Image (cartoon, grey):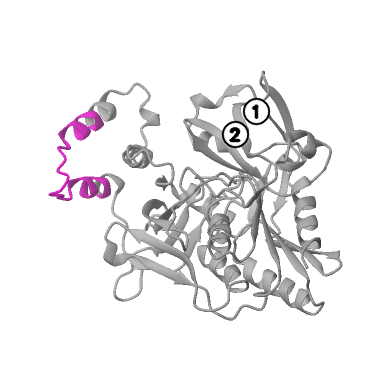
Amino acid sequence: MKKSTRVVSYIVIFAIVFVFGWEAASYYHAKVALTAMNGTQEEVPSPVAAFSSLLSTDNTDHPADLTLFWKVWGIVSDAYVDESALDKQTMVYGAIKGMVASLSDPYTVFMTPNETKDFNDSLNGTLEGIGAELTVKNQVLVIISPLKDSPADKAGLLPGDVIYKIDGNLTSDMTLFEAITKIRGTKGTKVTLTILRKGKKDPFDVAITRDDVNVESVSMEDKGNGIFYIAINQFSDNTQPEFDDAVQKILLKNPKGIIMDLRYNGGGYLDGSVSILSDFLQGHQVAVTIKKRDPKDNETMYVTGNAPLANVPLVVLVNAGSASASEIVAGAIQDHKRGEIMGEQTFGKGSVQEVDQLNDGSSLRITIAKWYTPNDKNISEVGITPDIVVPMTEADAEAKKDPQLDAAMKYIQGLK
């Protein structure tokens, strides 16, 4: 199986729009389909044969008796009342999903070919639906963050909201992909989400009209007096060129301070986060360390050393919707004391996933490592505590106020 070297750190943007967060997975390498020596794709075996081969592989460390599996397979195949529903490929996918789910790791997931395609589209910014990053946390469907200016954002959804029902149907009765499928839909159609929110006694409904969701990776604004605001909404293929363009424009104007906004950024390509750090951290400094099962395979990633913004005062805004690659950036800035982290506690995603692209178009995303900040901290389930905590209330959001950005402006303006 051929392996690329692309690393991704994501909270998973699958558009729910298919955007849903497998809670910031850091995708470390992407394996592509097996090819024969002559360059043609290897023949795909039948699903039953493939699964049988997979399960019969000898594993001396964890031997398994598969007699029961095939006993149940035979009973279902011979006795299930609706024979037309017995699709062997679907049964194989279901069995693999169950095996992967038994690890109880929300970041280790098997995806069918259709799910894989949706996921790949999401990484390329091809999204449609309501525009929200989701995850399963403590067995409930949770919003990590709405994407900026998306239908979900405009409808007032917030990080931490629990989706209790979709069009009146309990999400507890659905698989994650069933929930996503129900939320997705044709542009112009509506979906009603029943939301549970901390601080609210009762559930409430939010009706959202689906639409195209175009995720702008980087946006920049001149705030005046030499202060520049850069929002990074995700770490995608477009992030680095868009960020480089913004930096060139800023450098022409003798910047006095930069506010980098990573709020509601669920992650993306890990190498993108290292590239962003390279614009702020001078010299051969650690960006992130990746620790695997075998310590001999551990890897430390460094910034490039040529930092055009190394001496410009910096504030990084974060909140509960900042995850994975965003936390890598915030963690490195904080550990190197390069700037002030301001806002609220981040999400807390510190593991690394590898994506194996399988030859039938399906894929397996599996946790293979944990990542650590330069000071050797793993932030899983904890997140990053800002240097300066500035809360953002629901009332602030409804009134279109931004006390966190205001505090960042005030902080930079007060610097000598």
The answer to whether residue 238 is visible is no
Q: Is residue 129 visible?
A: yes
Q: Taking 33 as reference, is 231 left or right?
A: right
Give percent across and percent down for residue 384.
55, 50
Give percent across and percent down for residue 51. Answer: 26, 46
Which residue occupies the foreground of this view, 301 or 17? 301
Q: Give the magenta part as a residue range.
A: 50-73
Give me the residue at 77% from left, 39% from top.
Answer: 397
Task: Identify residue type, mark 2.
Answer: Lys
Q: Residue at x 62, y 77 (%)?
A: 307
* Residue holding disc 2: 182
Q: Residue at x 61, y 44 (%)?
A: 320
Q: Residue 19, how many percent across, how many down?
A: 59, 46
Is residue 70 in the magenta section? yes
Circle 2 packing at 10 Å, graded few (<14), some (14-19), many (20+), is some
Farthest residue, direction top? 202
Residue 181's spot in the image, x, y percent? 57, 37
The residue indicated by pointer 1 is 197
In what element is the residue under mark 1? loop
Nearer the camera: disc 1 or disc 2: 1
- Using the numbered discs, state the Cα–Cα distance from disc 1 to disc 2 in whole angstroms: 21 Å
Circle nearer the N terminus (1, 2) = 2
Quarter the N terminus occupies: bottom left
Compared with 254, 295 (above or below) is above
The quarter in which the C terminus is drawn is bottom right
In the rendered structure, the answer to whether residue 271 lies left or right of residue 316 reads: left
